[in-house]
Image (cartoon, rainbow, N blue to C red):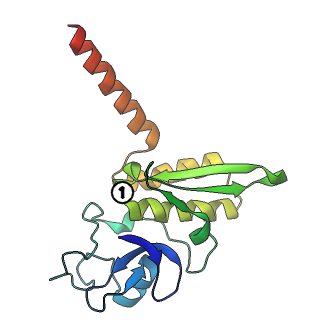
């Protein structure tokens, strides 16, 4: 996967290299053309894909993903990837000009960059529909759970408990 402009629609997003023509295509254009996600049966080169063809082996069941923002939707430009933190984030312009930060994390999305990106854009659309941040956070965490991932709060508490149990073992 590469974050570049899609050869078909021109949207800058995570793209996938088609082993048949070498072009880079966004998830939506790939699905529209091939009818299945990249790297899954029915996708381009699924039987004999080129070595550099992107595959999301950790994302076995894409049915857990919410509906993505349609091509050309503002969410495709608002949602940005921060590779150092492994998050997709955006700032929603709230009532009275307040800025509401929001993010999805790759680790919580079962280590799938694609899933985290799609969930972030879907969350952006929830803000457009007038949902509160708390409701969107709850919905986002349900998306993580459907994928078999874990919400960031659970990941943080597990890491903290692992660190704590390591200290206790060192003291014994």
The residue indicated by pointer 1 is 147
Residue at image x 37%, y 49%?
Answer: 107
Q: Position of residue 85 (x, y in %)?
A: 45, 48
How many marks overall? 1
Figure quadrant of the C terminus: top left
Question: Which SS class for mark 1?
Answer: helix
86 relative to 49, above or below: above
Locate residue 113: give its quadrant: bottom left
46 relative to 141, above or below: below
* 41 with respect to 97 (left or right): left
132 relative to 63, above or below: above
Q: Nearer the viewer, residue 133 or 21?
A: 21
Q: Nearer the viewer, residue 20 or 42?
A: 20
Residue at image x 45%, y 80%?
Answer: 28
Q: Position of residue 36 (x, y in %)?
A: 33, 81
Locate residue 159: give its quadrant: top left
Q: Residue furthest bottom?
A: 21
Figure quadrant of the N terminus: bottom left
Q: Nearer the viewer, residue 137 or 169?
A: 169
């Amino acid at each position: 996967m590469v974050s570049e402009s899609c050869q078909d629609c021109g949207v800058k997003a995570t793209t996938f290299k088609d082993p048949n023509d070498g072009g880079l295509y966004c998830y939506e254009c790939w699905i529209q053309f091939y009818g299945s996600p990249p790297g899954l049966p029915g996708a381009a080169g699924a039987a004999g894909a080129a070595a550099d063809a992107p595959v999301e082996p950790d994302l076995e069941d894409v049915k857990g993903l919410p509906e993505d923002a349609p091509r050309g939707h503002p969410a495709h430009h608002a949602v940005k990837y921060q590779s150092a933190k492994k998050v997709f984030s955006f700032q929603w312009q709230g009532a009275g000009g307040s800025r509401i930060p929001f993010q999805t994390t790759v680790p919580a999305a079962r280590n799938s960059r694609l899933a985290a990106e799609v969930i972030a854009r879907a969350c952006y659309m929830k803000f457009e529909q007038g949902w509160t941040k708390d409701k969107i956070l709850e919905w986002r965490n349900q998306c993580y759970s459907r994928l078999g991932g874990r919400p960031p709060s659970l990941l943080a508490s597990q890491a903290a408990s692992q660190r704590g149990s390591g200290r206790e073992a060192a003291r014994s």
